[in-house]
């Protein structure tokens, strides 16, 4: 039986509604999608897309979020849209918590729209941590390359303060338990060339200790590193390893998106529910132009549909 997947619509001023409409028949082959959106909003989107998806719209099962329906104003950062995308996400989580869906797929939100709506969370993952009181781990990628993030949406100035022995060791131990792989995982360094033995930084000494302690606790050499981030994604290295830990956001995601932008997805591990997302934003520059790719979305649904 195909699993039921709850789908939060994301920011309606971006490409989320287009992706949902465009991919409906494809994803219906692997799951039963439950769209957390008012059907009249999807009808508005379909009209803006030259009624290209009327047949799909007629066959979409929609659960209405607890929010007023804002008008679609393509590519606008809008308080009401932020509130609506948040309500859609909460409705999808409620369906999962009630066991009426086996996973949640999130379409892209606009973080500033959430701020305008008074939502005190910088994104989906932070809200998941608060809701379930567990340390959600963000992992992005595709079968060829997966990158786990030790720190995510924080300013670069705060990253160095966050990289400390015990929190990093605990993160690595948890990741080893929840990441479904028997392969070795590469931990990227934080300073250029991992500090060159102290010549340009000493923080990777702390990273090295965290890796050693995590491996000792796991009783296996699960983690390798620290490895200089500027060379870790070279072809010969990726031929040997598929799983990486980046200590901060851009150093891990810049190469991932350069290599696998359309196909990569974002998954949240170490939670009581399964959650996956597209690995791209609202794409206001192409909103309602029938140009959005559905590849990342389809891959997220396939990941959620696995037993």
Image (cartoon, helix red, strand yellow):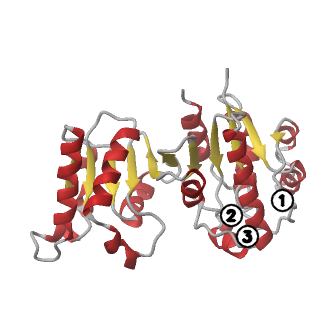
Which residue bears the numbered disc 1?
Answer: 67
Indicate the secondary structure of the residue bearing disc 2.
helix
Residue 100 location, quadrant: top right
Query: Which is nearer the eye, 93 or 38?
Result: 93
Q: Distance between the residues labelled 3 and 1?
A: 20 Å
On screen, residue 57 versus residue 196, left or right, reads right
N-terminal of the pair, mark 2 or mark 3, is 3
Labelled disc at residue 78: none
N-terminal of the pair, mark 1 or mark 2, is 1
N-terminal of the pair, mark 3 or mark 1, is 1
Quadrant in which the N terminus is drawn: top right
Of tags 3 and 1, the one toward the viewer is 1
- In the displayed orientation, state which residue is furthest to the bottom: 157
Query: Which is nearer the eye, 117 or 14?
Result: 117
Query: Residue at the location (26% across, 67% down)?
Result: 190
Q: Marks 2 and 3: CB-CB under 8 Å?
A: no
Query: Residue at the location (30% across, 67% down)?
Result: 163
Indicate the secondary structure of the residue bearing disc 3.
loop
Labelled disc at residue 75: 3
- Where 204 sits versus 211, above or below? below
The spot of residue 256 in percent (x, y) is 41, 55
Of tags 2 and 3, the one toward the viewer is 3
Query: Residue at the location (31% across, 73% down)?
Result: 160
Which residue bears the numbered disc 2?
Answer: 286
Q: How far apart are marks 2 and 3 (CA)?
A: 8 Å
Q: Can residue 234 be seen in this view?
A: no
Query: Residue at the location (19% across, 50% down)?
Result: 213
- Where 87 sits versus 265, above or below? below
Indicate the secondary structure of the residue bearing disc 1.
loop
The spot of residue 150 in percent (x, y) is 38, 59
């Amino acid at each position: 039986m195909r699993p039921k997947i709850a789908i939060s619509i994301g920011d309606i001023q971006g490409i989320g509604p287009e992706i949902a409409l465009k991919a409906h028949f494809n994803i219906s082959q692997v799951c039963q999608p439950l769209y957390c959106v008012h059907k009249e909003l999807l009808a508005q989107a379909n009209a803006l897309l030259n009624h290209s998806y009327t047949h799909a719209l007629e066959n979409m099962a929609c659960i209405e979020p607890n929010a007023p329906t804002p008008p679609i104003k393509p590519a606008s950062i809008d308080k009401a849209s932020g509130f609506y995308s948040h309500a859609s996400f909460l409705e999808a989580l409620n369906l999962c918590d009630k066991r009426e869906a086996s996973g949640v797929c999130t379409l892209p939100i606009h973080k500033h729209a959430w701020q305008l709506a008074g939502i005190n969370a910088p994104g989906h993952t932070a809200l998941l941590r608060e809701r379930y009181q567990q340390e959600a781990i963000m992992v992005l990628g595709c079968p060829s390359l997966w990158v786990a993030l030790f720190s995510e949406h924080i300013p670069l100035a705060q990253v160095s303060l966050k990289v400390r022995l015990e929190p990093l060791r605990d993160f690595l131990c948890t990741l080893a338990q929840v990441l479904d792989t028997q392969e070795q995982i590469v931990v990227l360094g934080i300073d250029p060339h991992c500090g060159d033995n102290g010549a340009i930084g000493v923080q990777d000494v702390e990273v090295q200790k965290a890796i050693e302690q995590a491996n000792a606790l796991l009783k296996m050499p699960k983690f390798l590193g620290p490895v200089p981030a500027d060379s870790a994604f070279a072809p010969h290295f990726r031929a040997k390893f598929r799983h990486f830990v980046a200590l901060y956001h851009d150093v891990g995601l810049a190469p991932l998106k350069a290599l696998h932008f359309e196909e990569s997805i974002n998954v949240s591990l170490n939670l009581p529910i399964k959650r996956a997302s597209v690995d791209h934003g609202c794409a206001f520059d192409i909103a309602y132009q029938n140009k959005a790719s559905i590849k990342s979305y389809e891959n997220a649904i396939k990941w959620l549909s696995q037993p």
